[in-house]
Amino acid sequence: MRDAVIVEALRTPIGKRNGSLASVHAVDLSARVLNALVERTGVDPAAVDDVVWGCVTQLGDQSSNVGRFAVLAAGWPEHVPGVTVNRACGSSQQAVDSAAHAVMAGQYDMVVAGGVETMSRVPLGAARETGQPYGPAVLERYDGVEFNQGVGAELIAERWGLDRTQVDEYAAASHARAAAAIDAGVFDDHVIAVDVDGATFAVDEGLRRGTSVETLGGLKPAFKPDGVIHAGNASQISDGAAALLITTTERARELGLTPIARYHGGAVSGADPVTMLLGPIPATEKVLRRTGLSIDDIGAFEVNEAFAPVPLAWQVETGADPARVNPLGGAIAVGHPLGASGAILMTRLLARMRHHDLRYGLQTMCESGGTANATIVELLR
């Protein structure tokens, strides 16, 4: 079987809600990262077999196959296709998995995978305003329950006995870790500057330096009067885009490119759609079984910080070393642009692996509806 390798991974800085990227259309933002990928690698875009692009809320600005129109907005040849995929928060991680699978199967030789979300322009929950998202049969099966991720996070906190101090300590640590990574230049080699209205935007802007348990203590619970989840220990509403170039070792050699990492394995799993956010636990177990690796073989983990209880519960259930989990911060600190987050996590994971020469890295995302992706990559340089 052929292999699939990542030869480049780039992302925009993550913009906060109504921040630096709010004026940029999702298609145009996608085009910028596509062209940055071409500029960095020197690859002729005409040789790209497909662009597989994640986007979650496919309404309004994001309604018309963003992947295809991003190709056109980038000025790439018209024969290059594009497709938009939606596996909720894991959409661009699924894009990476699907691209790697197609390359390994011999159906594609070179694919761009990634995603975008401009949550400032297409608000979270906008789908509820235009219809019934889940359908009557699903609502009947689950006794009319509201599928609310915040409520799911509260259920996880209760089940694992996580109190307000514990989740706030995790949130404060996310900001501290992200600040340290930014200051150390860990992201410099894969974050592209974006020019917006004459200004250059180059650094994730959701970060709140000096965040502490004390500063978070003043925030009111958002989902239960006596709950532990609030805006400060949940992921931020954000804008951003990211892209990876995936091909085979042989094709990379022909193009004079040196692969960063090899796709080692991927898995997707489902879990209770009411609690919703526990999917990363069985998905991680599944990908480890599939690859024959143990949790201790993995040198770095990226577990999306949708809410603080998600990585905390995941750590307990998997036995992963907490020091290896999200050491560069995460979505609590810098944001969660839904359709882009899977690809953003991969750029962050690769940065950690390269800076510390770690052979294996694993990323996993909780997703609306109870599904989750888990992906393992192996460092090559």
Image: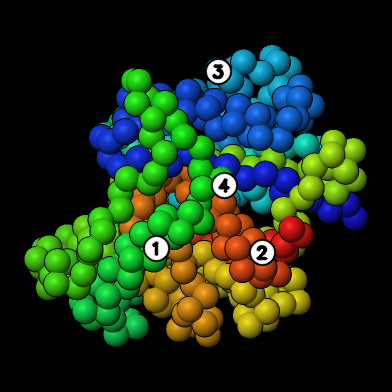
Q: Position of residue 55 (x, y in %)?
A: 49, 38
Label 2 or label 4, whichever lies nearer to me, is 4
Mark 3 neighbour class, 10 Å CA radius: few under 14, some 14 to 19, many 20 or more: some
Relative to the observer, which residue lies in front, 30 or 202? 202
Mark 4 or mark 3: name the one nearer the start of the chain: 3
Amino acid bearing label 2: Ile
How packed mark 1 is, by other alpha carbons closer than 10 Å (few <14, some 14-19, many 20 or more), is some
Cα separation between marks 4 and 1: 16 Å
Q: Which label sits on residue 180?
A: 1
Viewer-nearest residue: 333 or 226: 333
Q: Earlier in the sequence, mark 3 or mark 2?
A: 3
How packed mark 2 is, by other alpha carbons closer than 10 Å (few <14, some 14-19, many 20 or more), is many
Residue type, mark 1 in image: Ala
Asked where in the image residue 112 lies, by quadrant, the reply is top right
Q: Relative to residue 284, is residue 116 drawn left or right?
A: left
Q: Which image quadrant: the C terminus?
A: bottom right
Q: Which label was assigned to residue 73?
A: 3
The mark nearer the N terminus, 1 or 3, is: 3
Of discs 1 and 2, which sits in the foreground?
A: 1
